Amino acid sequence: MDAHVIQRMKSMTLFGRTKALIAGCVAVCVLAGTAHAQLFMTKKEIERQTRVQWLTMKRSLPIHPSKRYQRYAYCVAHQIINVLDDDFQALDWEVIVFDDPAANASVLPGGKIAVYSGIFDVADTPAALAAVLGHETAHLTQNHVIERVRANSGTNALVILGNAATGLGGMIGAGTELGLMLPYQRKQESEADLVGMHYMAEAGYDPRATLYLWRNMADRDETRPSEFVSTHPSPDTRMADLASNLAPALIEYNAAVEAGVRPNCSL
Ligand SMILES: [Zn+2]
């Protein structure tokens, strides 16, 4: 959906928006067989449909053959997971590295982490990878993933979820779009940056690696859309915000190190 349509949707009255959602919903809802649930999808329904999407991704996208990559991503991801609140720790976590040149990663509701192998070109240290996974995990814990699906539920995401649920064609591109390509709002990005930096620090990773990561991102000639290169805050703005919030994260990091938190994940 292009920007002016989004803007038009936002400026519509609640009544008008509901009518538009109904109009946009008819075809897909019939296909998905969940007609009444789509006007405002519950968290549970979104989680159910993203489980379907995750299964589709695992079947359809090439899983990276390197066991070392898989173990490494699993190890770093679990350092982050270990510092989350109990409710999030208790999710049925899965971490998979897909063989794809995109410098990207995402965390789906239910605790499913997709890492695209292109990310290792820019997140080429354990702390930089922890910065990526901290950021993505924060999108989940701060409810951004659910909000994003709901914000798009009148159009793209609904069609995508319908496709995933009914097993129609175009699943890979569409499923990827739902999880990775729809942009977060700027304030969600900033929040994920700060919360993610807190997670990595608590997990024993030096938060200064976030600055290193974003410098690498800025230098990368990225032609494919990515959560990290296509979102609004410019790398400069982002790094300035992160730098100005570095002090408390460094204190957390030092406290974690003193308490004996020493992550040991390596490629
Ligand atoms: Zn993000």
Image (cartoon, rainbow, N blue to C red):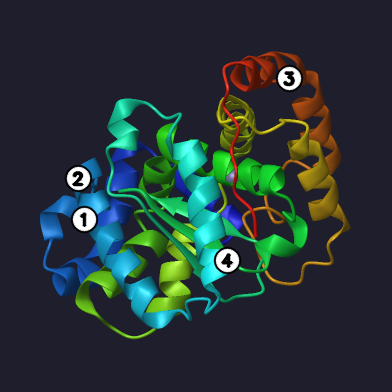
> Is 153 or 196 nearer to us in this picture?
196
Looking at the image, tell me whether mark 4 or mark 2 is earlier in sequence order. 2
Comparing marks 1 and 4, which lies closer to the viewer? Answer: 4
Q: Identify the residue at horizontal 42%, vertical 45% (top origin).
A: 145
Looking at the image, tell me whether mark 3 or mark 4 is earlier in sequence order. 4
- 44 on left or right of 85: left
Q: CA distance from mark 3 to mark 2?
A: 34 Å
Residue 1: in sight, yes or no?
A: no
- Residue highlighted by disc 4: 69
In the image, residue 129 lies at what x, y percent? 65, 49
- Residue highlighted by disc 1: 48
In the image, residue 73 lies at what x, y percent? 54, 56
Disc 4 + disc 2, Cβ < 8 Å: no
Q: Which mark is residue 263?
A: none
Amino acid marked by disc 4: Tyr
Disc 2 + disc 1, Cβ < 8 Å: yes
Q: Which mark is residue 44?
A: 2
Q: Secondary structure at mark 1?
A: helix
Looking at the image, tell me whether mark 3 or mark 1 is earlier in sequence order. 1
Amino acid marked by disc 3: Asn
Q: Secondary structure at mark 3?
A: loop
- Residue highlighted by disc 3: 245
Q: CA distance from mark 4 to mark 2?
A: 32 Å
Q: CA distance from mark 3 to mark 1?
A: 36 Å
Q: CA distance from mark 2 to mark 1?
A: 6 Å
